[in-house]
Amino acid sequence: MNLDNKTILVTGAAGFIGSNLVLALLRSCSFLQIIGIDNLSDYYDVSLKRYRLKQIGEAVERDSRNKWVFVQGSIADRELVNRLFEQYRPCVVVNLAAQAGVRYSITNPDAYIETNIIGFYNLLEACRHSYDNGNTGVEHLVYASSSSVYGANHKVPYSTEDKADNPVSLYAATKRADELMAHAYAKLYNIPATGLRFFTVYGPAGRPDMAYFGFTDKLRKGKTIEIFNYGNCRRDFTYIDDIVKGVELVMRHPPDRQNGSDGLPLAPHAIYNIGNSRPENLLDFVTILQEELVRAHVLPADYDFDEHKKLVPMQPGDVEVTYADTSDLEEKFGFRPSTPLRDGIRKFAEWYYDFYLSPASSKAEDGCRGSSV
């Protein structure tokens, strides 16, 4: 699918992945209309979301080939979703809006049902009715899933052929439910849909609730960081640029519509893992993080890291390892995420210094982020 001259709806457009995807599409496409929606929730620092939106606005100002429209609102608002579809008639829908976070799903489950279940259902219904009255309708629905759906599986690396019926958190359960609903709508209404299971996405301007970002904040404030499962966890860290490249490739290749032997449509639905396929031990990850924070002058060279680290037991909802089998992605698109962890953490550390600590930063006087150790 050529994305030039298309109208694309990106939900969660002020989020980490959403904003980077919008920027990538603006660079690679011509005469594109992107409609972004985000509720700008206060799950984490809203100023970070506004910073991402500002980056998008500046990109559009530099290159007027493409059109960008931002709408503040929730995909759980069915009337709003329907109005967007009626007004803009998107050809491609990329659903990146979600209530994220494994541990937060234990303390605030309502937010996950509202956005991840009701919100996604609203989008599926809007896609379904986009074909009404003989309209062309949505040509491809791409939606974010998560490595969390693999839950308590012991087989690694995780393959999309593996069962995903043992979620260990409500967040994981909602993401698996999204996959099942998308498959049902693809089958019933012949809507090409692709789910993407992301593995621990990180990078500049990322989510503050992720370990690398949260650890940096705590170390800056002289607090102690807790390393779960006594450091025996492994994570398949995937750099944001690799994630975005994978999403854009998938967007251009909707699953084929085909009929089965009964004459009815086979579900044009696919699922891919997007991960680095190289799990890193958390203790090794912390070592790389501290070295790069010192290199970027986020922390002083004589910082006593041993005094600010604590090994603690596994937390509810966590798993010991995440490890992506990306062979399907490689075979279909010839693409495999490959950014080394140190390279990605270095870019994050440099961004963190520029955004929060450099003399030119408006955040440099922020007592929460810019306080001395």
Image (cartoon, rainbow, N blue to C red):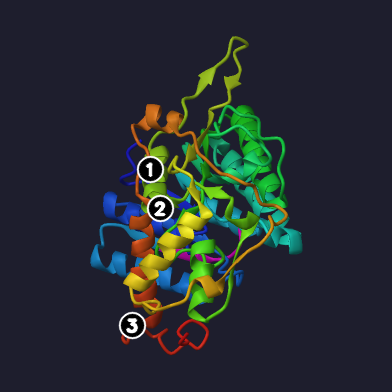
Residue range corresponding to the magenta coloring: 69-75
The residue pinned by badge 1 equals: 337
Dot 3 lies on which element? loop
Disc 3 to disc 1, C-alpha distance? 31 Å
> Which numbered disc flags the more N-terminal residue, 3 or 1?
1
355 lies left or right of 18: left
The residue pinned by badge 2 equals: 239
Given the image, on which type of amino acid does mark 1 rest? Pro
Q: Badges 1 and 2: C-beta atoms under 8 Å apart?
A: yes
130 lies left or right of 149: left
Residue at x-position 59% and y-position 9%: 261
Given the image, on which type of amino acid does mark 2 rest? Tyr
Disc 1 to disc 2, C-alpha distance? 8 Å
> Which numbered disc flags the more N-terminal residue, 2 or 3?
2
Residue at x-position 55% and y-position 33%: 191
Query: Residue 78 at x, y = what percent?
Result: 66, 55
Q: Is residue 155 above or below residue 233?
A: above
Quadrant of the rendered image containing residue 223: bottom right
Q: Is residue 356 highlighted in magenta?
A: no
> Which numbered disc flags the more N-terminal residue, 1 or 2?
2
1 lies left or right of 10: left
Q: Is residue 75 above or below residue 123?
A: below
Query: Residue 226 at x, y = what percent?
Result: 61, 66
Residue at x-position 43% and y-position 64%: 289
Q: Is residue 295 above or below residue 146?
A: below
- Pointer 3 local density, CA inside 10 Å: few below 14, some 14–19, many at least 20: some
The residue pinned by badge 3 equals: 358
